[in-house]
Image (tube, rainbow, N blue to C red):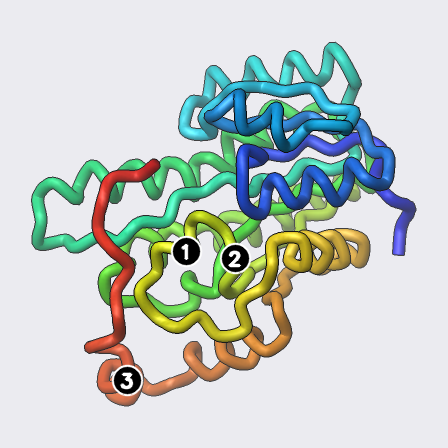
């Protein structure tokens, strides 16, 4: 494994996995750039850490450009950039109002990766790492979660393409697809969540994948087997098993 990163920029650091990753790397003395939509929550995350805070929504390319410019001016090029921001909310295509929700989810979970990485790529040193957080939900389309499943499938494929583009520059691209993590995003789910990880545990596992430059990893390992099984189920069997699966509540992204 390589040495621990000294400078780390993380999106989605207001809560959940992003906040847990900030605390994980901050505890090892890394200088942090933390971006999120809620400044008060960022301040809570950053308590006791060496961190620069940026109130920015990953859907806003200009805001992310400004955040990156601020971090580069204050700290310099990061050794590690983690795109952990995301939106998860139930959607149904039959409802016209959900079209706007689909757009918000796709903008955050796919274009948010682009907006996060692009400003840093021109100045990254060799052996730097870009890490994108995808999801096991992107392996197959799940009823009531069309926007989220589609966005995470797109995120995984985008990160794969980026990985190939960065190889010539010796910049690693790591894709981590978690299962369930105990965060505000999942606590509204009205169904069992097997193998659910505490946020701090998930952050440690993501950091392990980053240290090993894993091109793609599912965490925890039990969900990796679930993902493999889901991927290879014939459509008739998959349909029978999941047609009536419990669905995430519809609503507006928060």
Q: Residues within 10 Å of mark 1 (few under 14, many from 20)?
A: few
Identify the residue shown where x is 47% and y is 29%: 58
Quarter of the rendering occupied by the C terminus: top left
Q: Is residue 186 visible?
A: yes
Q: In the displayed structure, does residue 219 sit left or right of residue 204?
A: left
Q: Which residue is mark 2?
A: 182
Say few, some or many: other residues with alpha carbon within 10 Å of mark 2 (under 14 / 14 to 19 / 20 or more): some
Q: Which percent across, then down, holds residue 52? A: 69, 19
Q: Is residue 31 above or below residue 130?
A: above
Q: Is residue 181 above or below residue 140?
A: above
Give neighbour class at mark 3: few <14, some 14-19, many 20+ (Cα, 10 Å).
few
Determine whether label 2 and label 1 are within 8 Å by CB. Answer: yes
Label whose residue precedes the other's in the sequence (1 or 3): 1
Residue mark closest to the camera, 1 vs 3: 1
- Mark 2 vs mark 1: which is more N-terminal? 2
Q: Is 1 on the left-hand or right-hand side of 129?
A: right
Residue carrying label 3: 241
Q: Which residue sits at x=58%, y=40%? A: 83
Of badges 3 and 2, the one in the foreground is 2
x%, y% of residue 131?
A: 64, 46
The quadrant of the rendering that contains the N terminus is bottom right
Q: Label 1 to label 3, Cα distance in Å?
A: 23 Å
- Depth order, front residue of 236/168: 236
Indicate left or right for 192 with 129 as reference: left
Q: Note whether 137 is above or below 251 in the view shown.
A: below
**For numbered disc 3, what is the local secondary structure?**
helix
């Amino acid at each position: 494994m390589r040495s621990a990163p000294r400078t780390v920029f993380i999106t989605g650091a207001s809560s959940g996995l992003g906040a847990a990753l900030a605390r994980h790397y901050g505890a090892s003395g890394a200088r942090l750039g933390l971006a999120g939509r809620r400044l008060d929550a960022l301040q809570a995350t950053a308590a006791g850490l060496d961190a620069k805070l940026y109130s920015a929504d990953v859907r806003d390319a200009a805001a992310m450009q400004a955040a990156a410019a601020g971090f580069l001016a204050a700290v310099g090029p990061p050794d590690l950039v983690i795109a952990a921001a995301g939106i998860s909310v139930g959607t149904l295509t039959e409802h016209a109002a959900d079209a706007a929700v689909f757009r918000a989810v796709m903008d955050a979970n796919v274009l948010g990766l682009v907006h996060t990485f692009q400003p840093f790529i021109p100045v990254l040193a060799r052996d730097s790492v870009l890490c994108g957080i995808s999801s096991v939900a992107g392996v197959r389309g799940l009823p009531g979660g069309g926007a989220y499943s589609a966005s995470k499938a797109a995120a995984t494929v985008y990160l794969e393409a980026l990985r190939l583009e960065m190889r010539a520059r010796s910049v690693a691209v790591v894709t981590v697809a978690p299962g369930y993590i105990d965060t505000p995003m999942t606590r509204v789910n009205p169904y069992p969540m097997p193998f659910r990880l505490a946020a701090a545990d998930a952050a440690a596992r993501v950091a392990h994948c980053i240290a090993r430059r894993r091109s793609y990893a599912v965490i925890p390992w039990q969900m990796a087997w679930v993902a493999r099984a889901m991927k290879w189920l014939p459509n008739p069997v998959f349909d029978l098993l999941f047609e009536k699966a419990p669905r995430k509540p519809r609503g507006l992204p928060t």
